Amino acid sequence: MGTRLGDLVERFGGHLTGDPDIEVTGIAPLQDAGASQISFLSNSKLRALAAQSNAAALILSPLDDPTVAATYAGARIVTSNPYAYFARAAQYFVALDAVVPEPGVHPSAVVARGAQVDPSAHIGPHATVEEGAVIKAGAVIDAGCYIGREAEIGEGTHLFANVTFHSRCIIGKRGVIQSGAVIGADGFGFANEKGVYIKIPQTGRVVIGDDVEIGANTSVDRGALADTVIEEGVKLDNQIQIGHNCHIGAHTAMAGCVGVAGSARIGKHCTFGGAAMVLGHLEIADNVHISSGTMVSRSVLEAGQYTGFYPLAKNAEWEKSAAIVRNLASMREKIRTLEKTIKKLTEDK
Amino acid sequence: MGTRLGDLVERFGGHLTGDPDIEVTGIAPLQDAGASQISFLSNSKLRALAAQSNAAALILSPLDDPTVAATYAGARIVTSNPYAYFARAAQYFVALDAVVPEPGVHPSAVVARGAQVDPSAHIGPHATVEEGAVIKAGAVIDAGCYIGREAEIGEGTHLFANVTFHSRCIIGKRGVIQSGAVIGADGFGFANEKGVYIKIPQTGRVVIGDDVEIGANTSVDRGALADTVIEEGVKLDNQIQIGHNCHIGAHTAMAGCVGVAGSARIGKHCTFGGAAMVLGHLEIADNVHISSGTMVSRSVLEAGQYTGFYPLAKNAEWEKSAAIVRNLASMREKIRTLEKTIKKLTEDK
Amino acid sequence: MGTRLGDLVERFGGHLTGDPDIEVTGIAPLQDAGASQISFLSNSKLRALAAQSNAAALILSPLDDPTVAATYAGARIVTSNPYAYFARAAQYFVALDAVVPEPGVHPSAVVARGAQVDPSAHIGPHATVEEGAVIKAGAVIDAGCYIGREAEIGEGTHLFANVTFHSRCIIGKRGVIQSGAVIGADGFGFANEKGVYIKIPQTGRVVIGDDVEIGANTSVDRGALADTVIEEGVKLDNQIQIGHNCHIGAHTAMAGCVGVAGSARIGKHCTFGGAAMVLGHLEIADNVHISSGTMVSRSVLEAGQYTGFYPLAKNAEWEKSAAIVRNLASMREKIRTLEKTIKKLTEDK
């Protein structure tokens, strides 16, 4: 199945130069796209590649258009954000071919009598939906998922196979939860009495807004007394740990292996590189960008980019540097002694 | 449902000042607690907040009691460890309202004929219990769990949905395993022959003591020949990796994202901050505390707090410092040259 | 069940000194092995222990043989790589006792009509196999596994309980995937438009070669447009994250908690220590060895060992050193000032 360029532009905007009746069937990278595909140029460094593309049409910015147009003979869709346009168009093409899950409950699924499953929702094989849970219109619960008591899955939200979504937790509309993710496990809360830990019941929920994506094997713990909150538009990659009572602001994105300890409060539009870590009870302002592998050990109240990882080196060089790092205080002492001696020398003159 | 203050004190101890017939229904933080709830003061810095609380009663220490009592009109339960008292009382209140899983095997579960399931245990939907496994009294095996051959789940232990517990592994009494955890997967053992890895069968078990909690999506590998051992009272948070043949001493706690490589031997009453890592075959003494984000690259034989992570900085400053860290050896060389020159200068005088 | 030493040598090679009719039933460490077991010496430092072993026979190298033979009275199998020999022999003994999964589909499994399951394959309880999937001869799909549409599981490959293997992904022969692993979840790809993320469909596959092992709770994402590729013989431990479009060369091994960001291209025969991290789009040559806890923030084009983690210290010492690390630029400035002053002093003389 394909679509006319004219229909694409009608749907997603942009200015088309070329024949609106050209039929395209999908999207491909600049160098791979064939005569029935479109491609996109989101990085001006690739202008030369774009100019030689065999694609039927190119999505590109007003800035790149004149240069590319000089040699590229195909159709062009000019738009201010070609990468976002590509994302939307790709979603459209994928939906044309996608296998749509059938509405209804698979006979092997176990759905409690008091659960409310919208007739347009899909419940896959071996899924379990507990008493009082609510599965809204168009939601897709794939095989092996577990939905706890009184949990709520919003309209059009998709839980891939083997997701665990615990009691009373909520996710909004158009969400995506990848396989193996666990939402609403108990937070890590214990009182220590003479060296022995006593469990503090975790009675809060996880409350997730609209348009949130949560990656494979990621864990988001329920709150202790209050809730853990993930605001709308947040994107969490795989293997992430979000502790109890965290609050993650809207449209913040975290790459794989990030860990956020309990009660951290993170702003909106932040980004966290892979394996960045945030200690508990810290506050992070809006628009803060934390580099990969960085331990955030204090609150960050000012927007900007922050970093802190040990630089990579050949092992032999690392051994030398690391030995010195361990003794930096003595190096500073030597410098102080030198300064004093020199001060004395110059005064003596 | 609620309980009388008098009954609470009879059950959990502490000295009550106030009317024992006051009925309370739950626990809430100092600022949120209403007239039918109790609250607790575990941090003296919050005395002012406590004094203004609307709670029906406060749990507090002998140290804080006089100050709070001066202005707070409600009942007071004085105890040496208010936080532990809170934990126990909260467990009690939660149990009053909790939905108790019904004893018995869900019709959709697959339980092998030779498995022994105590009649008081609960086996949820789509669970699998293999031949020779033993599920003891009061154990709760939630939906989608897998219990391997001859594995043993102790009295009152609770496996949340989608836990995998492999063959011959054992967990003791009153344990908790959160969703997505994998106990007893093969350890990572290979012999290298001319660049190709040959798998070493992993035939040990995971042996877990009483009162252990294991977090969501955490993995504990079975031993290669001998067993991996987790002693009683250990608490592991989410996303943790415990390699084969590790031994973790009683009442040690690890926060999220910690990794422990194979054959590490860790003492009792240790704590590990989030994302701390321990290399293989190391020994760590009792009462060692490792900070978050710290790589333990040598044995730690003396109790105390140990740390090692790169300090966070604005990205521009990190770039400068990291460049210097890479060249610390040359900086040390410059200092040595300076020292020699000055020695010569002072001797020349 | 046991086997004759003569049969063992016929099967796995090596030179036997001793009675070929001795019957052995298994393998044990040097100090534990009894009179019906064999043991192995792979580390010359343990020669003394070997010489005193009660094992019926020892596997050892030509180098160690003369010393051990002087005092050890049992049979000896001399081979160039005793550890690899041990691995193969251990596999053999384990197979003698192993419970072989019965061929066929468990009645509780849900297998789509258009899926092709070889009659010799095993599909366990509560497994789901979607339309068009291909399960080849001798493959073992344990309880609760999910196999997506048109996915392909190679001959003799074993998926342990609760593995998720998504649509169109492929794994070759003799592979092993441990419980909780997720293969083929969506990669983390979004276009940002005015602060809001728009999902980029992830339409590539994960293509895995022969003899690959993937650990518990590890995630390997599908590619965005092209595929994520794991070549033959790769071994991934637990809790690992492999981003979309990564390419991992043959016989590379990664220890637990490693993270590899998208589009990284890693060579053959590399090793990664636990919790090592690789940023996206980097290239790593063949035979590169990355130490545990190291952030690979630039391409590594030359074979060798590379390291970069902050050295562990007592907390008080770390606090001093870390404070200096943050101010290394000012320390360098002081040294420059000292150098100038001294230059002036010496010129003045």
Image (spheres, coloured by chain):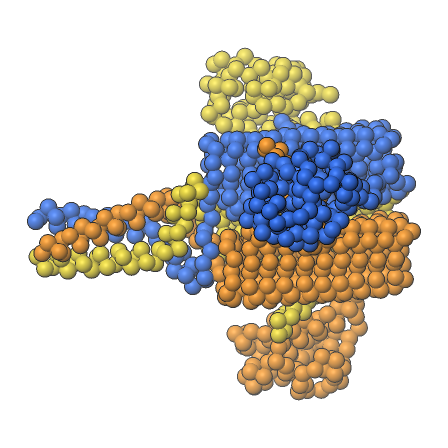
Chain colours: A blue, B yellow, C orange
Task: Determine the residue positioned at 72% across, 76% down.
Answer: C36
Q: State left or right for residue B70 relative to residue B252.
A: left
Q: Nearer the viewer, residue B198 or C129?
A: C129
Task: Determine the residue positioned at 78% across, 50% down.
Answer: C167
Q: State left or right for residue B225 relative to residue C93.
A: left
Q: Give the image location of residue A299, x and y in percent.
A: 47, 34
From this view, report whether residue A272 is shown above or below residue C284: above
Quadrant placement of the N terminus of chain A:
top right
Q: Give the image location of residue A107, x and y in percent.
A: 90, 41
From this view, report whether residue A341 is shown above or below residue B47: below
Say which quarter of the image contains residue B142. Answer: top right
Q: State left or right for residue C142 relative to residue B58.
A: right
User: Total label count?
Assistant: 0
Q: Give the image location of residue B337, x and y in percent.
A: 23, 59
Residue C153 in view, yes or no: yes
Task: Determine the residue positioned at 73% across, 30% down.
Answer: A173
Q: Nearer the viewer, residue B176 or B306?
A: B306
Q: Nearer the viewer, residue A53 or B284?
A: A53
Task: Determine the residue positioned at 13% across, 56% down.
Answer: C347
Q: Give the image location of residue C323, x and y in percent.
A: 37, 43
From this view, report whether residue A55 is shown above or below residue C100: above
Residue C109 in view, yes or no: no
